[in-house]
Amino acid sequence: MAWQTALTELFGIECPVVSAPMGGSAGGVLATAVSRGGGLGMVGGGGSEPDWLERELSLVTAETTRPWGVGFLSWADDVDAVVRALAFRPSAVMLSFGDPKPLAAPVRDAGVPLIVQVTTLAEAEQALDAGADVLVAQGTEAGGHGGGRSVLPFVPAVVDAAGATPVLAAGGIADGRGVAAALCLGAAGALMGTRFQASREALVPAEVLKALVEGGSEDTERSRVLDIARGARWPARYTARTLRNAFLDRWRDREGELAGDTAARAEYRTAVARGEIPAVPVWAGEALDLINDIDSATDIVAQVSAEAAEALTAARRALTAA
Ligand SMILES: Cc1cc2nc3c(=O)[nH]c(=O)nc-3n(C[C@H](O)[C@H](O)[C@H](O)COP(=O)(O)O)c2cc1C
């Protein structure tokens, strides 16, 4: 089917679907697979080592001539990383979490479309001021780090604030019904993370894939506990939605105490070393109920696209019947 939204037009892609730039797991192979499916594949450059990023960006440029992008963390990454990535001529650079202005400058100078992910209306205004070409309105349903707004009311509010700037919906979207809903909210497409994390091309260990398929949405929780335990310096306003584990259960609602307890943090490292909890938290969103298998990302884009068309056709039928 042929899609025409502000997103597909801007990037010359076939489907209104973007994969999230998931640090460490969204490498060049995943980005290529998404772009081959007709979406916009993103490499997760946030917090990465220069060698990792260079290898993954080399992969994507070697494997596809279709549009692809790369993402960074505004609070953590430096301008040099963005400049190095721009040398690979991405079709888009995405910035998330924090003031986008410092990292936006080289992107805008290079004339590359800038996508900024936002978690509040104030961040949406900040992103527009920084010259964002596309906003991603992320709801609290999202896997990984994020804020507290819910997709259903947040996306249209960002659409209203953004004027002519296209908006993507993110958080809790894993199938075509979610993409159709995003379009109905006024978005130009959807950005999906958890669905692509559970794909064949993600750089994810087999046991994490198994946990994603077996886990349900109600097994996920937003918290700072695991960031504090592993010494990650994320700004406190961005909590992380992960699968629950024994450590999180023990320290829930005791973040202040955990931060001051070096023995507890050593205990966390011991539990990781013993294999009792995963070394990297299993970031996963509320879409987990909808994810029951590990497919190729290319197939996921095709399937989501077909389902979205079906969902919109069904909605249209409801109108005809009225
Ligand atoms: C495993 C995982 C890692 C993520 N890492 C990043 C990241 O490095 N940078 C970023 O901008 N967003 C990251 N996110 C958040 C996504 O950009 C996006 O907001 C989220 O995946 C959307 O919700 P969903 O997971 O329900 O699809 C991550 C999400 C997941 C699931």
Image: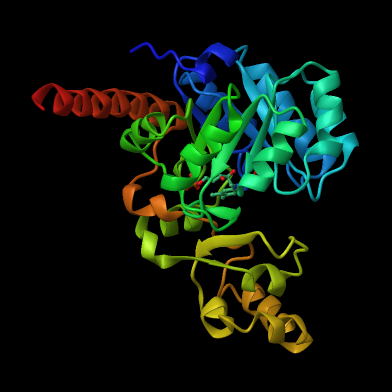
Q: Name the residue furthest left.
A: 321
Q: Quadrant of the N terminus?
A: top left
Locate residue 290 relative to residue 229 in the image: left or right.
Answer: left
Q: Is residue 201 above or below residue 216?
A: above
Q: Is residue 244 above or below residue 129?
A: below
Q: Is residue 200 visible?
A: no
Nearer to me, 248 or 202 = 248
Residue at point 36%, 60% (across, down): 216
Q: Quadrant of the C terminus?
A: top left
Residue at point 70%, 32% (across, down): 128
Nearer to me, 310 or 153 = 153
How many numbered marks, from 0 up? 0
Locate residue 21 relative to residue 37 in the image: left or right.
Answer: right
Residue at point 53%, 62% (across, down): 242
Locate residue 20: give its quadrant: top right
Q: Is residue 245 visible?
A: yes
* Residue 99 x/y as whole percent: 78, 45
* Residue 28 x/y as whole percent: 64, 30
Nearer to me, 115 or 271 = 115
* Residue 49 x/y as whole percent: 81, 44
